[in-house]
Amino acid sequence: MNTGGRLFRISLYGESHGPAVGVVIDGCPAGIPLSEDDFIADLARRTPGAEGTTPRRESDRPTVLSGVFKGHTSGSPIHIEFKNENTKPEDYADFTKIPRPGHADFSATIKYAGWQDPRGSGHFSGRITVGLVAAGVVAKKILNAFAPVVFDTKLLQAGGSHNIDEAVRAAKNAGDSIGALVEVRVRGVPAGWGEPFFDAAESVIAHYLFAVPAVRGVEFGDGFAAAAMRGSAHNDPFISQDGRTARNGAGGINGGITNGNDIVLRVAVKPASSISVAQHTLDFSRDEMIDLEIRGRHDFCIALRSAVVLEAATACALADLALAARAGKPWQSNIPWRKA
Amino acid sequence: MNTGGRLFRISLYGESHGPAVGVVIDGCPAGIPLSEDDFIADLARRTPGAEGTTPRRESDRPTVLSGVFKGHTSGSPIHIEFKNENTKPEDYADFTKIPRPGHADFSATIKYAGWQDPRGSGHFSGRITVGLVAAGVVAKKILNAFAPVVFDTKLLQAGGSHNIDEAVRAAKNAGDSIGALVEVRVRGVPAGWGEPFFDAAESVIAHYLFAVPAVRGVEFGDGFAAAAMRGSAHNDPFISQDGRTARNGAGGINGGITNGNDIVLRVAVKPASSISVAQHTLDFSRDEMIDLEIRGRHDFCIALRSAVVLEAATACALADLALAARAGKPWQSNIPWRKA
Amino acid sequence: MNTGGRLFRISLYGESHGPAVGVVIDGCPAGIPLSEDDFIADLARRTPGAEGTTPRRESDRPTVLSGVFKGHTSGSPIHIEFKNENTKPEDYADFTKIPRPGHADFSATIKYAGWQDPRGSGHFSGRITVGLVAAGVVAKKILNAFAPVVFDTKLLQAGGSHNIDEAVRAAKNAGDSIGALVEVRVRGVPAGWGEPFFDAAESVIAHYLFAVPAVRGVEFGDGFAAAAMRGSAHNDPFISQDGRTARNGAGGINGGITNGNDIVLRVAVKPASSISVAQHTLDFSRDEMIDLEIRGRHDFCIALRSAVVLEAATACALADLALAARAGKPWQSNIPWRKA
Amino acid sequence: MNTGGRLFRISLYGESHGPAVGVVIDGCPAGIPLSEDDFIADLARRTPGAEGTTPRRESDRPTVLSGVFKGHTSGSPIHIEFKNENTKPEDYADFTKIPRPGHADFSATIKYAGWQDPRGSGHFSGRITVGLVAAGVVAKKILNAFAPVVFDTKLLQAGGSHNIDEAVRAAKNAGDSIGALVEVRVRGVPAGWGEPFFDAAESVIAHYLFAVPAVRGVEFGDGFAAAAMRGSAHNDPFISQDGRTARNGAGGINGGITNGNDIVLRVAVKPASSISVAQHTLDFSRDEMIDLEIRGRHDFCIALRSAVVLEAATACALADLALAARAGKPWQSNIPWRKA
């Protein structure tokens, strides 16, 4: 399913070497200022060009085809399109017969019975995430209609090292790729978003995060470290009436509901599967093991570009939760320490 | 939202000290053998009684109130109810004024404006997961209509130690609790389940897993370790025509689609928030810090009981993906290495 | 699918001769006063006993098993259960082999491959609508949190006659049944609920209305008469700043969005399919035409009882639309005639 | 919400005078032959030009921007775009201050607080239905993968008259518009599609039909006539093992499930609200009644063009039901008269 969200809904479409990719966003309230310029900063963060990213020039210019009128959202669906340029439809390797290790070539071939578009990974290309970044920009606008919400996203490590530039360079020199650990921190989220069980804030956010290609793990607050902790260490005492806790070990969420502290989450991004070094793998057509060398443009550390995608995914999830919380807000208060 | 799933849909209801908890399951195909006995084994796995679990006697006897006729699913919704027994409605502490650290008391109070049922944690009680375990039993039946799918779930660590019994005992003696690391392994899942982006297999599974109380992190295959790996090490060559890979570093999923290898995932379960040791936290009513001692029945290691819940959550997610894959299966094959 | 709604979600379950039927309601905001007494009036309206309705005594006593605490909704799912009493599980005819004309016996047998519960029509029994009536009561409570919304539902005709009692009596004496025309009028709905296209107010309301057994047609405002009208006659001039129109030919909805006038709709309810008079139809087992006489308790005019069900269906749809409108409400106004 | 469907999902976007309108279709199985030529016939049916339709030249050339590879669906989302040509963005009347009677101008202004795009009715323009027609073409392709399904759609009456051409001409000469009655008949739908209650075939179909602008009523089979019938007349005996009935009074659906007979439904389409004759209505800005004359291009009988839209809406609904039925099909048969 390429449509996500309950109230803030996004539909992604497109293939790497088709004419265009984009996103249709439904459920954005009317009257929010929005222009094409608003997309520039976030789109620039996923643009290739920095060391470690693919040299392919992409057209990252968004065209807003609907849903915006006189500089404000109009309440109808917002369609943001990105033309694919610099594609060479005939210039692609078809990995259907020799599926790349770590890639969707094999599983997609089974699922779609071989009918999928294989050019440049088709719909499985990282290219498709440009629409998610655009949706994230709109989501952030919605969030800021609720409260001054600020995102702070960064790579904590690449290839296991804190010295990220150096690790990327080493991978590049080796014709290899490296994974990375990305942290997304969101300040200013009010308490009360999210619901127990199937719309738990972690559930909805993780759903979006795992929709981003190459994500292998998601953790909130103390995350996997909590598995090794005692309750007396992990529990996090409240220290102020607005719900502030001593050390935010829960990453801003208790019982699936935001508690007013920063949302803190970390995402494990695997190394890109397309690498120059030879890989010994199966040629399905001939049913024999061969040495596969993948030529062309590679990302040495996709996390450099996917950081903003993960931030956007988090923003989309939070916008959906924010609108749902708004819908369900009680009309009367029964909070004992807020009475009188 | 307490309803999950697109085709296999489950709706949980109930509170810890109300008359009953349960689940309504919609979308189970007709004609699958099902009896109340089928629930016993999995329900027993989350029954308290083992060391480290709460001594409260719960009624874990399922009553199937609809959807089953003459020993088979009838195609209509399956309602499985569990009466709450041994509850003492008047015998509960109200943590609305002094929210427990690490618990949903505060965030739920904000969300529901103080109207939530606070007795025994109400709808936030682990008690509610009994319905999820029941749904998991039905989900497994569906999965086995597709293929012989087998679940293997275990605690890898508790409190950071592989010696789980000892770690639990130590926590118990300290009046404390410990977290744990749970692995769910699913054998026999066919290739081709899941879809790119918002119904990626990891997205749907993680959505369900994070719906289980106390989950702090979810990872697939190499998981967070992949963030420190190189592509040449993480990539996983195919070694047989059925998609088998050398070491299953992807945990059975590429591009959001199952690849026929075992689904392998790990879940970080935090320590239970209710502990006997005193905690210095805010009394919201009086706006002063106090020492909170939580009396009563505690789980020292909730992961002992939630392992089967996490397994059930995985089963529910997979059943939903399996039915969706069945709906969308191509009518014709274009797979080059399966032709002729 | 037995779950309806996006924000106000209801899940029906149960069979006519099973132990219980009921509904799980999710998405009701917390803090709304609700007690079991609130259900009595509407449930009484679908209780058999009046002339033209089946003499079977049903237990229409609702038991609220979750979601209500101290007389208010708690924000968690509301489960309302109705025990089936006076059922005689062995005392039922199985119409699988000789499907009743006009009934779901045949189509259900194909869909469920014969596994459905045939006792007293199983899940296809009108009995299941008791849960919908209960959900309607909760929906009305939500609507009244927005505005003083009042429902006025009545039979306009039965068997084509305005003299409803007489028409029912005639059908009863003939061992036959009659259809009826039901009007639902809703006063007090604010302008601005509903959305273009797939959540058009008519779409959502009609979706719920056609979910009620025996509905053959739904029309809004001028309805089918509009097909024979000219624009100059059907168009409906606005006459006051609050959107009041001269004659409400649109039934309170323009472009899928409520316009502040009364919602007016009419529903065609077909005659009950179970009748005493012999029907010449196919015995599928023997593949020959036979004369079928259906014995037992019949409704002569089901619309007498389904009127309140249709009202409840409308209320559920409106509650869903109301919550969605609340979620998406613009933060700023740009209405020219409301400025300054 | 501008996204419809559970398995076959369509997202419409665009405004009348924006750069483009279109549809993103998700959930179409891979491997179905599809080319841009396939859209021509249905699109031509809603093209203006025939007497009674607006003289505006529209670009009804579809551009398939994704989801199709080498002449077959690829399994990824299908985006079909239609450029808006011949628009004159500055050449439009803004009906925000003087909302047209019978139109969405007023209700949209309230809902979107005046932020909606008013040019040529914006997102409320009939122009948007071009995407629905395109989606219908894809839906029909899916239906034909199940069975040879054939649509037969026609106007039964216009302005209450069977002499449609003459009625349209008379309306045109009067500067007025007329409504019409449209019948959609679908042959070849197998028994077993649809589900009781919230995915009843009538519910899902009616949901889509009422999403089409100007629809005032929907009825199936005997429809509103059934309200005046007796059961002995409306009931419809089965006459053959494949479920054929004597006169198909149910319109092909029993208990929300298709029974193998033709789906027969009728839709009441109201007269277009934009007419040349003067209308006495409120000027909201000045709060006084004025005589409104609407200049420009009008449809005298929109049903001439919306017939194919209603057919497409029906096809989309059926495709969704077909895929759901495929997902839930029992693995074993228990039908007594099909055994042995």
Image (cartoon, coloured by chain):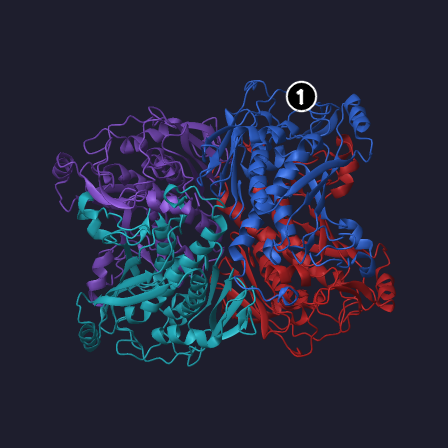
Chain colours: A blue, B red, C cyan, D purple
> In which quadrant of the rendered image does the C terminus of chain B lie?
top right
Where's the N terminus of chain B, which quadrant?
A: bottom right
From the top left corner, tell me how far across and down residue B140 is, in percent: 61, 57
| Front in this rendered view, residue D98 or A89 | D98
Amino acid type shown at disc 1: Arg
Q: Residue at x 25, y 67 (%)?
A: C155
**Looking at the image, is B161 positioned above or below residue A5?**
below
Crowdedness near tag 1: few (<14), some (14–19) or many (≥20) residues, C-alpha within 10 Å: few
What residue did someone put label 1 on?
A297
Q: Residue at x 33, y 29 (%)?
A: D40
SS for dot 1: loop
Residue at x 53% of width, y 70% of height: C72
Residue located 35% across and 34% down the image: D130
> Quadrant location of residue A155?
top right
Camera-nearest residue between B178 and D291? D291
Residue D56 in the image: x percent, y percent?
Answer: 27, 27
Which residue occupies the extreme front position in the image?
Answer: C340
> Is residue D196 visible to us here?
no
Determine whether, in the image, residue B116 is placed left or right of residue D166.
Answer: right
Q: Is residue C269 left or right of residue D165?
A: right
Q: Position of residue C66 (x, y in %)?
A: 55, 70
Q: On screen, A252 above or below B167?
A: above
Please say if B187 is above or below B94.
above
Front residue (pair A178, B184): A178
* Residue C141: % across, % down: 44, 66
Is residue A70 at all visible to an observer of this figure? yes
In this picture, is C20 found above or below D15?
below
Q: Chain of mark 1?
A: A
Query: In the shown orientation, is residue D199 left or right of residue B291?
Result: left
